[in-house]
Image (spheres, rainbow, N blue to C red):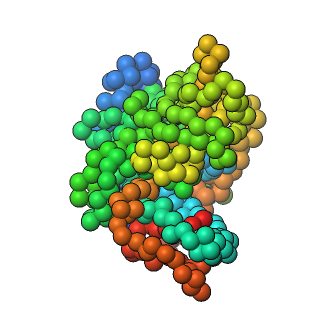
Amino acid sequence: MRYLTAGRPESQRRDLLIAVGLAFLSLFIAGMSPDSRLAVTRVVRSTVLAPFLGAHRVFARSAELTERVTALELERERLAVEVLQSANLKLENRQLRIIAGLPERRAGDFAVGEVTAGAPETGASHTFLFRTREGIEPLTPAGISTPQGLLGVLRITDGGSGLGEFWTHPDFRVGVRTPDGSATGILRAYPAEGGETMMLLDGIPFQTSLAAGTLLETSGEGGVHPPGVPVGRVVREEDSRSGWSHSYLVAPLVRPGQARVGLVWLVRSLLEPGPEKVGIDSTSAGQEPGRSDRVSSDSGD
Amino acid sequence: MDVERSAWAWSLAGIATLLVLHFLFRPLLVRLPVAPNLLVGALLLATLRLRSGHAAVLGFGLGILEASMALEGMGSYALALTVVGYVGARSRDLLFADARFYVFGYVFVGTWLAEIVLLLLGTSPAGPVRLILGSGADALLTATICGGVEALTASLSARQV
């Protein structure tokens, strides 16, 4: 390959003029208003760079899906281990209930659905769309949670889709308790210092003290949320009212942006007829009978 | 004439491939601690075959594209790559005439200087270590890839003739 040489002097002068002109044009662009530069960027990105940006979106989506599949596989393995470990406990519990003459305890069913933050028509940041399979009509309001903890409440549903509110919504309230039941109270969203949305546990009697790190879970009062769903951990005491009660700042276990999939509690399933008595069955320690599109939590554990 | 045209076509294909690879894998390349700057490499390969004025125009255009992709420093990128294009095309006469062996050194030095200029113009935050060593490593990688592309396109055009 033969490379070009610099050429004749008059050509060199013309090339220099071109380069100097472009350098001044660059400086002019650098001095343009951000809006003008953004307009140029938009034009370039929607024309020449459009195929590359499309490819970037495909790559990013593919990487995100791979990450989600990996996370789901890990979660599935962890759940499989937990199910195996709980088998003996279930059997023991059933046998004890038979001895005590108690009917089978039913916690209700859950349906899995997709959570999409924000209502498109309003752009509200505290609400979400929930989509599950056709035919599942939860009684509303119904609690929505993830395996990690409470996410919010489903307000209205229509044919497998629904609109709900994250726990960050100003109107959201949930009854909580400590796992040992030593303290109960009402949790609500609370704007902490620095603008971060945290939770506030109100109405704790003055003589009751909660240590930092104490887990809080739903108490089940009101029938919206099933009991025992983790909600958050105590951070510190926030306020004291006239020596009668005090409140605690609580760090949530699940933030709205972290959840893409949620479990809605089908309280209606508790109203459906179920087995009154349980018998000792060699297979009962394994899987529970249930609808294929539901995640059943009927058990005595 | 056919020999020249064939060499041009293969060189153009090599430069275009480098540019497509750069814009296609840019999100990945910017995250790596050491990555080839295929944009500057392709521009330097082009400056071997273009007049300095045309090389400056190409550099300006690539600067606008890169800034639009990065969403920042539009004027800086355009200015830096315009200067790289013009100076690259003018300086090739000082370095070599026809010897292909020097392409590696040309791209290495050119990329290193271009990266330092880009960093100094504030297109990315960098300390002195990144400025010297990081840019040098990037330039070495770029020169290796571009030298390979140059050798490949030259051998392909020679085989076709």
Q: Is residue A266 above or below residue B35?
A: below
Which picture quadrant has residue A206? top right
Residue shown at the point (54%, 81%) measured from the top left: A279
Residue shown at the point (42%, 40%) measured from the top left: A166
Residue shown at the point (50%, 69%) measured from the top left: A103
Position of residue B141 measured from the top left corner of the image (x, y, whole percent) = 66, 53
Q: Answer with left or right where residue A121 lies relative to residue A223.
A: left
Q: Is residue A271 above or below residue B116?
A: below
Viewer-nearest residue: A35 or A221: A221
Q: Quadrant of the N terminus of chain B?
A: bottom left
Viewer-nearest residue: B146 or B5: B146
Is residue A155 in view from this perspective?
yes
Position of residue A63 measured from the top left corner of the image (x, y, whole percent) = 51, 59
Q: Answer with left or right where residue B131 lies relative to residue A8.
A: right
Residue closest to the far bottom? A282
Viewer-nearest residue: A9 or A294: A294
